[in-house]
Amino acid sequence: MVCEAWKTKLGTYLDGELPDEEMRAFDAHVRSCPSCAADALTRVQMKRAIHVAGTRFTPSAEFRRRIQQSIAAKPQRNFQLGWMLASVAVLGIILAVVGVTSSYRILSGREQASRDQALRDQAFGEIADLHVATLASSSPVDVISTDRHTVKPWFQGKIPFAFNLPELQNSEFSLLGGRMTYLDQTPGAQLIYDVRKHHISVFIFQELKLPASLRENTLSPKKLPFNMETWSQGGLRYFVIGDAGMADIDSLAKLFKAAA
Amino acid sequence: MGMSGAGPQSDLFEEMAMPLFDQLYNFAHWLTQNRDEAEDLVQETYTKALKGFSSFQLGTNFRAWMYRILRNTFLTSRTGLKATSTIPLDSEEDGPERAVENDTPETILMKNSNSQLVQSAIADLPVHFREILLLCEVEEMSYQEIAETLSIPIGTVMSRLSRARKILRDSLRPQFQRTS
């Protein structure tokens, strides 16, 4: 390999990220090549300079104390739920011990179903929150365009997947734009549509990155203040949500299903 | 925004999260470039992390998880949206790294040892390049950890990092030459 080829990998070599065999070969080359050795030395010095310059900001002792205090502040809802479930489990054990196994099974089954439903409600509630927060924002969309050929490429490099947007000719929907969003620490796309003054959000995430509670096609509409439809297609999970009628939500969902 | 937690979960969370406090704050300050915003960002990160700690799988990378929460929170903040919407992230593909020449930012750096110039150059980097450079050089994360933190493939980590270094070197060159 000529020096130029080695030098293209110099950064990766100095980060210690080349495969073992290549690392060894690079070590040997640097020992025998003054030019690459000099380059490696100067790059190491630059790495050190960045390390020193980058270690710059220190939090105040007061701020640290504030964070520490707030971690150990008061009981949290999720943990309360955890303790409640633990209590239910303990109760189940006691019941089992006294031989009331059939009653326990019924109780346990109901608790499980109730807990699953609560998790689903909470998860879909977060989708509704994202929709509301977007509409309440002073800049609801980051890419403002009615053209799907403008909106779709905007997401490239920002989210780790690609998706298709439907053709809206001959439909009542119009695209207002899109933005990046996050759900359960998972990046996704949010598209905003308008239909007769109603705004509808379409959220798209990678299915397998979402928690199980969001990978359900069944909804509990009475718990949601909006109409919503969700489905999985091509490894992606779609959520269509808005204050428009269910027929409009369904129509937009169908357009997306056809485009995917 | 207040945080809340008590009992073994919050004890474990505190044990795992507080050692990262200084580093997370440093990273947050670099992203926001403002002390108050950095404090808000770190506070919100700890709030979200504590709230979601029950979903964190012990044995997986906690540091990458915390940084991911911080970074995602930043990206959806007003400052983050402004930073990412005004500067397009061009193609990740970049030419090969240039060979180091005789009179380079690094060699001049050796002569001048001017950390302020480097700090200023890092601060001027577009946020996507700034964050990846800091994660690699300051936090000394592996490419795998960076990929997890930024939710991008390792190939993109390599090309973006290479590009960040090149931009930094190019921006330092004229400044160093002025001071040399």
Image: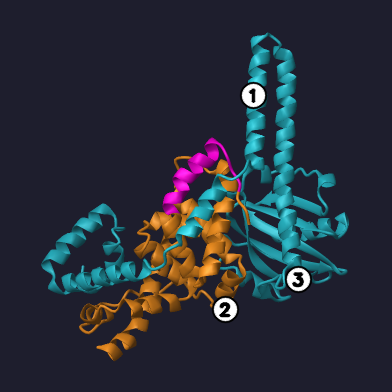
Chain colours: A cyan, B orange
Q: In which quarter of the view is residue A9 placed?
A: bottom left
The number of numbered discs placed on residues in the rendered structure image is 3
From this view, report whether residue A86 is shown above or below residue A194.
above
Q: Residues within 10 Å of mark 1 (few under 14, many from 20)?
A: some
Amino acid at the residue labelled 3:
Leu
Identify the element where label 1 is drawn: helix
Q: Position of residue B23 (x, y in %)?
A: 42, 59
Residue that carries the numbered disc 1 in the rendered image? A89
Comparing A164 with B125, the one in front is B125
Residue highlighted by disc 2: B86
Circle number at residue A175:
3
Q: Secondary structure at mark 3?
A: strand
How far apart are labels 3 and 2 at the CA level? 22 Å
- Find the distance from the CA under tag 1 to the CA under tag 2: 53 Å
Range drawn in magenta = B4-20
Return the residue nearer the eye: A190 or A148. Answer: A190
Furthest toward the bottom, the residue is B178
Query: Which structural element holds mark 2?
Result: helix
